[in-house]
Amino acid sequence: MGSETARELPKIDFSGVEPASPGTESWNSVRAQVMQAMESHGCFEAIYPQVTPELRESLFRTAVKELFALPLETKQRNIHHKPFHGYLGDIPALDYYESLAIVDAPLPHATQSFANLMWPETGNPTFCETVLSFSKKVAELEGMARRMLMEGLGVDKYYEDLINSTWYLLRFAEYQAPAQGEEKKLGYVPHRDTNMMSVVCQLQKDGLEVQGNDGEWLLASPSPISFIVLAGNGFRAWTNGRVGAALHRILVGGDVTRYSVVLFSVPKKDFLVEAPPELVDEDHPRLFEPYYDDEFVRFCVSEEGTKTMDTLGAYNELIKARKAEA
């Protein structure tokens, strides 16, 4: 059995990398590490001090705590027509989980609209300033990681089109600690994200676990200046399986409530998720039928979709079956 170090997620330092400077020596060095990590694990830990400890402190100690302290009926105003895009709570078998989300969080008007919904009398300008600053910085990290992967795969000519065809969802999550003396409980079921990529920031080190290729669960323990970056099923499909989507779960234990804030890059409603021709050939036949994210997400919450952890594979078989019947 490998050492403890061997069981950690790949750790990549983005300290000297700038979003506007692709092609530099530092960029290319980090890109090679990102490619290796994503091809082997579908995720990695990103050291990213551009989000300062002060900003994290303001986010978790003030903004997030204020948000979850609101009355339930106020939090339930956070509704959206698309599953997983608004308030989540009171989920069977997930008694410890509650969550809210902001669509287009890096855009000032979107964050302000959310704050107006939660705090109609004041609009909570401090919350808006903190969340907006955090969202923009983390979106830069996601954009760099996605661009590096596309460069490594030789399809970076599609980068601008892909960026323009996605938007960002910011999700706040609270996982209540189990009763004193209880063992660790499942805070969120094992799953692969439906979207392109996800960047996880958590207050406590423990909780998030990622399944390795050998089936063992690896504890993701980021530092106060790092994030966990995961590929989702959207990017898995777009890259024709060259990048795998990380299966992950949340376990909660101890006596401290766990908080996380996650930025998701999501395909727009009219964007067809389809691997570019450069990634499809005799050695790499097309693995997934083209699809729209809205339809895929609705499948994931259907009775059939909830029966499998490989929702993309199951949905792909459904599309092929429909085509065969047509």
Image (spheres, rainbow, N blue to C red):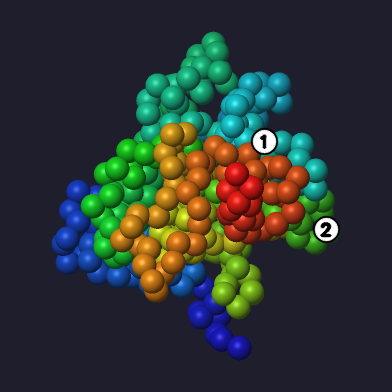
Going 38% across and 33% down the picture, which residue do you hit?
106
For marks 1 and 2, give the CA distance.
24 Å
Residue 257 appears in the rendering: no
Q: Position of residue 128 (x, y in %)?
A: 43, 27
Picture mark count? 2
Determine the image quadrant of residue 74. Answer: top right
Q: Provide the residue designation for mark 2.
A: 182
Quarter placement of the N terminus: bottom right
Q: Position of residue 112 (x, y in %)?
A: 44, 21
Residue 21 seen in the current view: yes
- 179 lies left or right of 122: right
Judging by the rendered image, the residue that carries numbered circle 1 is: 88
The residue shown at (80%, 43%) is 92
Q: Quadrant of the C terminus?
A: top right
User: Which residue occupies 67% across, 58% down?
Assistant: 309
Given residues 123 and 211, the one toward you in this image is: 211
Q: Secondary structure at mark 1?
A: strand
- Name the residue furthest bottom: 1
Residue 47: % across, % down: 38, 60
The image shows residue 156, relative to residue 56, as above or below, that is below
Compare residues 53 and 201 and report the one nearer the observer. Answer: 201
Q: Position of residue 24 (x, y in %)?
A: 16, 62
User: Mark 2 is on which residue type?
Assistant: Glu
- Mark 1 or mark 2, whichever is nearer to me: 1
